[in-house]
Image: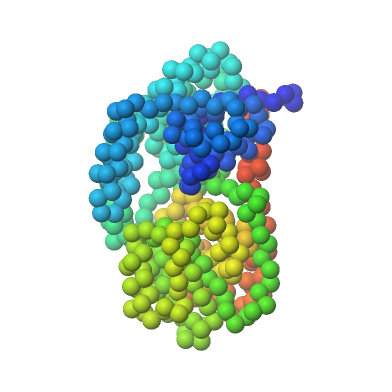
Amino acid sequence: MNNKRKKALLIIEQCNPDWSSVPLVGYNFYYEISQLCDVTLVTHIRNKAALQKHQEHQDIIYIDESQFSKNYHKFIAALTSIGRKNWPLYIALSYPIYEEFNKQVYQKFKDKVLGKEYDIVHVITPMMPRYPAKIIRACVNTPFILGPVNGGVPFPPGFQKVARQEFAYFNFLRAIGRKLIPGYVETYQKADKILAGSTYTLNLIKDLFKIPKERLELFYENGISKNFFHQKKTNTNNSVINLLFVGRLVPYKGADMLIDAIHNLSDDLRNKIKLTIVGDGSEKVKLENQVKNLGLEKVVSFTGWIKQEETVEYYKQADIFCFPSIREFGGAVVLEAMACGLPCIVANNGGIGEYVTPETGFSIEPKSREYLVKELTAKIQTLVENKDLREKMSAKCYQRAREFEWSKKAKKIVELYQQLLK
């Protein structure tokens, strides 16, 4: 292979540096890959204002949206927000909006791809493994890479009450979509390489589409920016150990279980700790009442919603990160905590259980609510009482998080491009 920079067509429908979650992940992939390749970015018009603030980004094609899609989006957003947000129904009903984008991308770029104007075509978002990419039909002589895709993780059997609260009974729509959405199966069966964001999703794709293992690769979708790393300083004030939770306050994130675990500690241990809950959501008032009813007002505090870039200050002040989310696809907050040297206590279901190793924290099997609360209590006690263990895990967390730097992830992506081009 020569050293000439490769020309990559990156299709990232959700790509926005000003937003969080998937749009921000999409942007970070785009930015870092563009440092190593000549990139043409294709994204949705909704991202234009944010991307145009960065004048260094030049070769961007924005896909417009019809008035029908704008009105339809308002309708389904209102419909699925009655009471608690019904995400499974929202995702299912949103498909026509994505398909409009998908068709336009194909129409605009099929001739260029067929004409081999790009060395590689890479579709990065949407990340849920539910969408087709029509452009693959033009990738006759151009390698096509998909992902990282992540999702499909079920609720643990012992948490069916939470599953109902999160409208999991609408998940049958996934199977219907696989059968009815044109090009869905074709996309997965023809892709030269599929990146999966968790072991569960990798196995799901392999079994659903009978994909040979050489066309699948485990590749976690989340990463960490260099400026987020802050090596933990030794806590000389042993009188208070600071615990931290960062996330949306919704049932499956498990903040209620963490509060119960704190309550189950001995009086002596509770007097040694403070728990800060960073975030907002539908459960906030309920959680505040739980704290009040358990008499934990002096131990547990709520910050409300905090800008993502400001959360680093809370990580820097903490000693232990607790995040018992029972169904987490990406779990970027766990990587953020590790980048700040915080030993992590998580539930082992989805990506976060794979981020946390025995050297960096505890990953608890979510057998039932009672079991998870009991184990949370025990692991908190272990880390509060064992300063040496905390410090050893802190150093290992920092090292582990370094593996997820965005620049390193982009380098691995480009190495994959080169392998496919051979």
User: Which residue corresponds to the image point at 41% horizontal and 55% vertical from the top-left?
Assistant: 327
85 to 216, vertically: above or below: below
Q: Residue at x 37, y 58 (%)?
A: 281
Quarter of the figure with residue 84: bottom left
Residue 139 image point, x, y percent: 51, 20
Q: Is residue 212 visible?
A: no
Q: Please state which of residues 241 and 373 is positioned toward the viewer in this rendering.
A: 241
Q: Position of residue 310 (x, y in %)?
A: 55, 57
- Asked if 303 appears above or below 107 in the picture, the reply is below
The residue at 28%/34% (across/down) is 72
Horizontal side of residue 375 vs 312, given as left or right: left
Which residue is painted at 51% across and 43% down in the image?
A: 18
Q: Residue 293: tell me if it is visible.
A: yes
Residue sitting nearer the eye, 93 or 152: 93
Residue 121 vertical placement versus 19 (above, below) = above
List x then y, in percent, for residue 411: 66, 38
Q: Nearer the viewer, residue 306 or 358?
A: 306
Return the residue found at the far bottom.
268
Q: Is residue 173 left or right of residue 195?
A: left
Q: Is residue 34 left or right of residue 294?
A: right
Please give the count of numbered marks on the rendered protein: 0
Query: 279 above or below 219?
Result: below
Q: Quadrant of the N terminus?
A: top right
Q: Position of residue 342 (x, y in %)?
A: 60, 65
Q: Point out the image quarter for the C terminus.
A: top right
